[in-house]
Image (cartoon, rainbow, N blue to C red):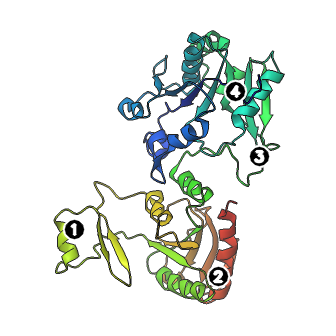
Amino acid sequence: MNSSDEIVPCVILAGGKGRRMGGREKALVNLLDRPLISYTIEKISGKVAPIALNVNTNLKEFKKFGYKMLEDPIKGHLGPLVGILASLNWAKNMDQKWVLTLPCDTPFFPKNLIESLINAKNENPDIDLVVAKSRGFKHPVIALWKTTNNIKLKNAIEDGIRKIDNFTSQLKIKHVNFDNLDKSKFDPFTNLNSPKDLIIAMQILGKLPPIIGLAGWSGSGKTTLCAKLIENFTKIGISIGTLKHAHQEVDIDKPAKDSYKLRKAGARPMVISSKERFALIQENDNEEKKLFEILEIFSKNPINKCELILIEGYKNEFIKKLEVFRSEIDKPFLYPYDRNIFAIVSKKKIQVSIPYYNINNIRGICELLIKTSETQIYK
C-alpha cells in the first residue's frame, strides 16, 4: 500500500481553555467569518478517517460539525496530554494501530503533512511516534501516535507529568523536518494563540494588507501627521485605509436624518449608500469590538482595495507602531516600554536608540512605512 492510499484516524485537539484569546473557545473564534477549527477540518477532509474532536466545553456548538466528540478521560483541564490520551484510547478501541493528532489552531500546515508522517512511520517500523518539525522547533501535538502507548501515557499523567516533551522522552521518536519539504515564507505550523496572531493569519491568507499604528499621547499630532501621510501616499499611487480608535462615545449619524431613525428603530446593521460613497453603521452589543474583529472589515469586498492600513490609537495593541512625540505636552516616551514601536517622529531633534524622523519629513516617513510594511507581506 502506498502511503498516499493509507488512511489513519485523526483527532483535532480543541479542549484547551484559550486563555490568551480572552478565555474564548479558540476553535470557535472566527477567522474571516469561519471558525478557526474549520480550516483544519478542510485540510484533512478525504485524507484521514474517521475524524473526532477532543472537546470539553461548548459541546452543543461542536456537535454542529458532525464528528465524534471525545471529552478528556481525566478531568481538570490538565493539558494536551489528556487530549492525546483520549485520542489513543478512541483509536485503540477501534483496533487502529496509529492515530493522528492535530491542534485546532494551526490552519496553515503543509498539504503533504499527512503523507509525510505516514511515510516516516512506514520507513521506521519500530518507532512509537512521528513528530513534525520546522524552524528548529518540534511540534509533538502534530504527530502520529502508536495507540499501544495509551496505558503508558495514562500512568504518566496520573504520576503528574503534564509537559508533552517529558512524556515523549520515553518513546522512540522519528522527526520529520518540514523545512526541507515546505518552502513557505512563514512557518507552516504557526499556531494562533492570540488576537495578534489572528491579524497575522489574515495577512498570510492574503485578505489583509500590512498595518502600521500611529501611537502617541493625546495632542501629539497623530491625526495631522496621518492626514499628511495619506496625502503623500495617494500622490505616489498607494491606496491607504485608516482606522481611528475613539475613547468617547461615537455617533456619526445625525438625529434628523432618515438613517438615524432607521438605526434607532433597530436596524442591525444600517447601510446608507450613494453614488459617491457608502457607510456602514453597526451597534456594538455589550462590549467594544477587538482590534482584529474591526480589521476583518478591511478583508471584505468592496473595502479590501487598500495596500496599507494606518491605525491611529490602539497604543496598547501588539502591532508595529510609529510613535508621534511632542515634548510640549510633557508626557514620557512610549517606546522604552512598547517593543512594537520601531521609530519616533517629533518636531524637535531628540536622541533615541531607535530611528528618528522629523515630523515634517513626510517623504522619508512614507519610505520608512513602506519598508516596514514589506515585512508583513507573506507570499
Residue that appears at 60% across and 65% down:
320
Determine whether label 2 and label 3 are within 8 Å by CB. Answer: no
Rendering coords of residue 237 (x, y %): 61, 84
Quick one: 212 or 51, which is closer to the camera? 51
Q: Of the residues tagged 2 and 3, which is closer to the observer?
A: 3
Please tell me whether residue 226 is drawn above or below residue 83 in the rendered image: below
The count of marks equals 4
Determine whether label 2 and label 1 are within 8 Å by CB. Answer: no
Q: CA distance from mark 3 to mark 1?
A: 50 Å
Mark 2 residue element: helix
Rendering coords of residue 226 (x, y %): 52, 81
Q: Quadrant of residue 162?
A: top right
Mark 3 residue element: loop
Say which residue label 1 marks.
263
Q: CA distance from mark 4 to mark 2?
A: 46 Å
Mark 1 residue element: helix
Please tell me whether residue 194 is drawn above or below residue 216 in the rendered image: above
Determine whether label 3 and label 1 are within 8 Å by CB. Answer: no
Say which residue label 3 marks.
182
The disc placed on residue 365 is 2
Say which residue label 4 marks.
165
Q: Tag 1: residue type?
A: Arg
The answer to whether residue 332 of the structure is visible from this angle is no
| Other residues around mark 4 within 10 Å, as few (<14) / some (14–19) / many (≥20) | some
